[in-house]
């Protein structure tokens, strides 16, 4: 009978050691706490003239055509080139996307009213893949051509991502919120001419 107790103890110690190793590897990889975290980013529309509303005056703020000091600032609104509406893939995702051309000729991808889950290693991608509603999003957008515009700044709000001048927009037809760690789309939008 003492042998059985010794074997039982050894099995428990081995199981505990395996559980510690699995936990030590799984927690940083999966980051399950991100299911309960949110990051809100609310960036201004590129090219918009900022308005300060902090004042003791009861008169509403005004925007002048030219600032009183400093270099001349263009007040021309950005040109909308492409638009799309985000749909859900692996995680519930909502919001809109727009590709904007600014007065200086640069281009920006704008996410507006984004609402998705937080997750590890989330990126914003331009992709040549079609957006298929109802598909889970696994291994969809990394099979063809894509361009990583950077890490997702937050899982809620309004955000801007610079599009390099070398990117040909005709080569891409969608935007994906992509989890690079697990090769899955949280949500995506088909880009259409504005």
Image (cartoon, helix red, strand yellow):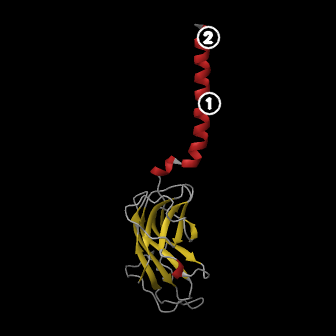
Say which of 84 and 118 sits in front. 84
Residue 193 is left or right of residue 121, and the answer is left
Residue 21, given in percent of the width and then of the height, sits at 62, 36
Residue 30, given in percent of the width and then of the height, sits at 54, 48
The extreme top residue here reads 1
Residue at which label 1 appears: 17
The extreme front residue here reads 143
Say which of 178 and 65 sits in front. 178
Residue 18, given in percent of the width and then of the height, sits at 60, 32
**Can residue 57 be seen here?**
yes
Query: Which residue is located at x 40 percent, y 60 percent?
Result: 135
**Label 1 Cα neighbours within 10 Å, binned few <14 / some 14-19 / many ≥20:** few
Residue at which label 2 appears: 3
Label 1 – label 2 distance at C-alpha: 21 Å
Give yes or no for contact between labels 1 and 2 (Cβ–Cβ under 8 Å): no
Residue 83, given in percent of the width and then of the height, sits at 42, 78
122 shown above or below 13: below
Say which of 190 and 109 sits in front. 190
Q: In the picture, which quadrant includes the N terminus?
A: top right
């Amino acid at each position: 009978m003492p042998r059985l107790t010794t074997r039982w103890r050894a099995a428990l110690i081995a199981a505990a050691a395996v559980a510690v190793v699995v936990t030590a590897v799984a927690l940083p990889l999966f980051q399950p706490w991100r299911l309960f975290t949110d990051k809100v980013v609310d960036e201004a529309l590129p090219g918009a003239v900022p308005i300060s509303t902090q004042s003791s005056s009861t008169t509403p703020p005004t925007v002048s055509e030219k600032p009183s000091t400093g270099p001349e600032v263009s007040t021309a609104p950005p040109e909308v080139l492409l638009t799309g509406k985000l749909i859900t893939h692996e995680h519930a995702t909502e919001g809109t996307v727009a590709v904007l051309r600014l007065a200086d000729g640069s281009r920006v991808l704008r996410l507006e009213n984004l609402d998705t889950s937080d997750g590890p290693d989330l990126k914003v991608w331009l992709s040549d893949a079609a957006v298929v509603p109802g598909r889970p999003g696994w291994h969809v957008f990394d099979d063809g051509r894509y361009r990583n515009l950077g890490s997702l700044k937050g899982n809620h709000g309004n955000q801007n991502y610079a599009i390099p001048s070398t990117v040909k927009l005709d080569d891409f037809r969608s935007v994906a919120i992509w989890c690079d760690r697990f090769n899955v789309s949280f949500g995506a939008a088909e880009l259409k001419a504005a």
